[in-house]
Image: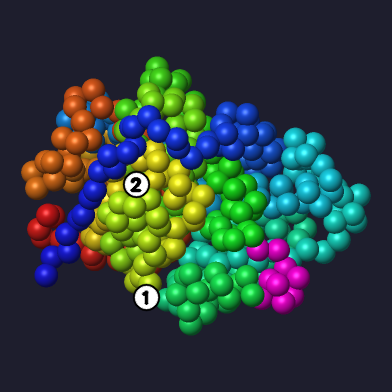
Amino acid sequence: MEERKKWISNPNARKQKEKAHLNFLGQDETKKVRNFHSSFPQYEVTPLRNLANLASFAGVSGIYVKDESYRFGLNAFKVLGAGYAIGKYLAGCLNLDITDLSFAKLKSKEIRERLGDITFTSTTDGNHGRGVAWAAQQLGQKAVIYMPKGSSLIRLENIKATGAEGYITHLNYDDTVRMTADNAEKYGWVVVQDTAWEGYDAIPTWIMQGYTVMVDEALEQLNQQGIEKPTHIFIQAGVGSLAGAVQGYFASKFDCQRPVTVVVEPNKADCFYRSALAGDGKPRNVAGDMDTIMAGLACGEPNPIGWRILRDYTDMFISCPDYVAANGMRILGNPLGNDLRIVSGESGAVTTGILVEILHNEKLKEAREQLLFDKDSKILLFSTEGDTDPVIYRKVVWHGEYSSLDCS
């Protein structure tokens, strides 16, 4: 039976009431993050693709996709959070502010001797763990990375190629997070995880701040094209750290004039959709295997920091079957006219897939009307990963796996 897309609008998003504080995602903090990342020799601003022909086909003014497959040569955005969190942690060990540190200084013999040997550990479906492992390697430290059952062997090998230890467990994502935290306590490691729990919120906060580099770059690139801000943003959610960072950045900068924001999840791990559906302001968890093609979004327990932001500021939550992400991969990989091709992985393409359906599928007319789309709409999307598993990418884009005859 055809899996269907589900959506729910958030009636509280535009109400003037006490909301989650956003200072930690404001312009002052973003400037610190961007200065730190720009000190890495590999740092370059990733492309913002203007898909003008797709926008014309969809009946809107513009569709803009931030292509994170170019980020630090790692094919995904996650290193922005992991790298900044590790930098902040090391700054704390040195009793310094992050503004006093750079990549070169952290690599110096003097600083390495002061720090000694540190092991960072994390749970990942691939991209986050690779970012942690790469950042640790770059700064002369060690990493031990755990992956949930069913994880890609290619992504595991990419992690181990940095010199990190890497293992696939027999647990789901959230249970693997708990195992990682237990091992860290046992062996004296430092957990670098993008979700928070009681007594563990500093590093998840730093990770969210790290992600704002990507958002700040995107807005700057839009400004360079004469666009003050997008009218709409579609952003994918796993634990909600990225979505919270994107939402928090724009809400902090533009307040009630912020873009309309839509959070998109896989239907097998749609904890934010279910939380919004409950309507009581409390997060809901999803248990089980969460065997979605969108491996980077297969998380069943919301980051409470991200949840509070998304609860208070997000306009709509959408739960999507896997074929929506697959359609997005094919749309971006086979562009219209002279639009540039974007190689986008499963978690990176779901927002493109659902956007095109909302704009074209009459069964989603009500959602389209609630989002106030018109011919002047300018939509910003983030392709958060490239083909981090090339085998899966080819199966979807070449061979048509995860297709749907009835895109309802």
Whether the residues at callouts 1 and 2 have beta carbons within 8 Å, the answer is no
Pick whichever, 131 or 362, lies toward us. 362
Q: Amino acid at mark 1?
A: Gly
How many neighbours does mark 2 have within 10 angstroms: few (below 14), some (14-19), or many (20 or more)?
many
In this view of the protein, can residue 265 be seen by the observer?
A: no
Helix, strand or loop for disc 1? loop
How far separated are the C-alphas under marks 1 and 2? 22 Å
What residue span does the magenta drawing correspond to?
183-192
As drawn, 241 above or below 26: below
Q: Which residue sits at x=13%, y=45%? A: 364
- Residue in the image at 27% along x and 54% along y: 277
Residue under pointer 2: 263
**Residue sticking out furthest to the top:** 226
Percent coordinates x, y for residue 359 in the rendering: 17, 39
| Quadrant (top left, top right, bottom left, bottom right) of the N terminus | bottom left
Instruction: Check disc 1: other Cα within 10 Å, few if <14, some if 14-19, many if 20+.
Output: few
Badge 1 or badge 2: first in the primary sequence: 2
Query: Is residue 87 shown left or right of residue 385?
Result: right
Q: What residue is pinned by disc 1?
A: 288
**Identity of the residue drawn at 77% across and 58% down:** 140
- In the rendered structure, does residue 185 fall within the stretch colored magenta? yes
Q: Is residue 381 above or below residue 186?
A: above
Circle 2: residue type: Val
